[in-house]
Image: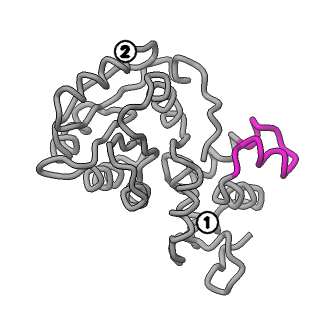
Amino acid sequence: MADKHSTSEQPASGRPIRVLVVDDHPVVRDGLRAMLDAPGIAVVGEASSGAIAVQRVDELQPDVILMDVRMPDMDGLTATRLIKERHANVSVFIVTSFSSVDYLQRAISSGASGYLLKGMSRDTLINSVRLVRDGGSVFDATLLQEVLAGIGYDPAASAAVRQLSDREREVIRLLAAGRTNREIGDLLGYSVGTIKNTVQAIMEKLEVSDRTQAAVLAVRAGILSTDPGGSGAA
């Protein structure tokens, strides 16, 4: 869904990316912590359930949360929804053993910025943490479009999208169609940097933390539709 354009080891603020690791298995938490031992990343805490994770976000103020799905007390998808409701700027991505379209759909609906399978390489994990911290997302593009295709029209989302400028509406329409920043720039005649800045402005106006959530909101607004229900169409 997003361009993997972020190659810097330090975020723009100059401080490390603060990561919270959530999994009910200590061995998995230890493994993820070891994999994240990299410049510009700091694992600031762990949690063994979704309920504990929700409590620890206020205390630890992480930038990124690695969230398991099946855990005691509260599952990771419910925890993700609660965290995103309270901390919209925190990026959560699911790290699970289950390759499930249903789980993926629920993860996106809950506000997750990504969905990775356990067993991914260290480089994939590190790059994904950096990418979602910069407002990107980590999903299989084909599965993501399948999920977006099943999302229904929402008048509130349409009202939110109407506040965007004409350029921003063009960009979010292509973003929701699965285009990368480079593809959007080529289609609209803008540089990648301009598109990146426009996507950032869209996320700020829509009060979402990543481009996938912006795409979901755009689909709910009917921006890809030409029927009467899709009054937000561009």
Q: Quadrant of the C terminus?
A: bottom right
Q: How is the image coloured?
A: one colour
Task: Classify mark 1: helix, strand or loop.
Answer: helix
Tell me if label 1 and label 2 are in contact, CB under 8 Å.
no
Q: Is residue 10 above or below residue 137?
A: above
Q: Which of the numbered marks, if any, corresponds to residue 161?
A: 1
Q: Is residue 217 left or right of residue 91?
A: right
The disc labelled 2 sits on which kind of residue?
Asp
Residue farthest to the bottom, as pictured? 228
The disc labelled 1 sits on which kind of residue?
Val
Task: Classify mark 2: residues with Cα within 10 Å, few (<14), some (14-19) or many (20+).
Answer: few
Q: CA distance from mark 1 to mark 2?
A: 40 Å
Q: Which of the numbered marks, if any, corresponds to residue 194?
A: none
Residue 159 is drawn in which quadrant?
bottom right
Q: Is residue 10 above or below residue 142?
A: above
Residue 63 is drawn in which quadrant?
top left
Residue 26 is drawn in which quadrant?
top left
At 65% across and 47% down in the image, what residue appears?
A: 199
At 33% across and 43% down in the image, what residue appears?
A: 96
Question: Percent x, y for residue 156?
Answer: 50, 74
Q: Which of the numbered marks, if any, corresponds to residue 37?
A: 2
Q: Earlier in the sequence, mark 1 or mark 2?
A: 2
Q: Is residue 134 left or right of residue 106?
A: right
* Residue interval drawn in magenta: 179-195
Q: Is residue 100 above or below residue 158?
A: above
Confirm whether the magenta stretch covers residue 105.
Answer: no
Which marked residue is nearer to the observer: mark 1 or mark 2? 2
At 42% across and 25% down in the image, what residue appears?
A: 17
Towards the viewer: 145 or 229: 145
At 76% across and 37% down in the image, what residue appears?
A: 192
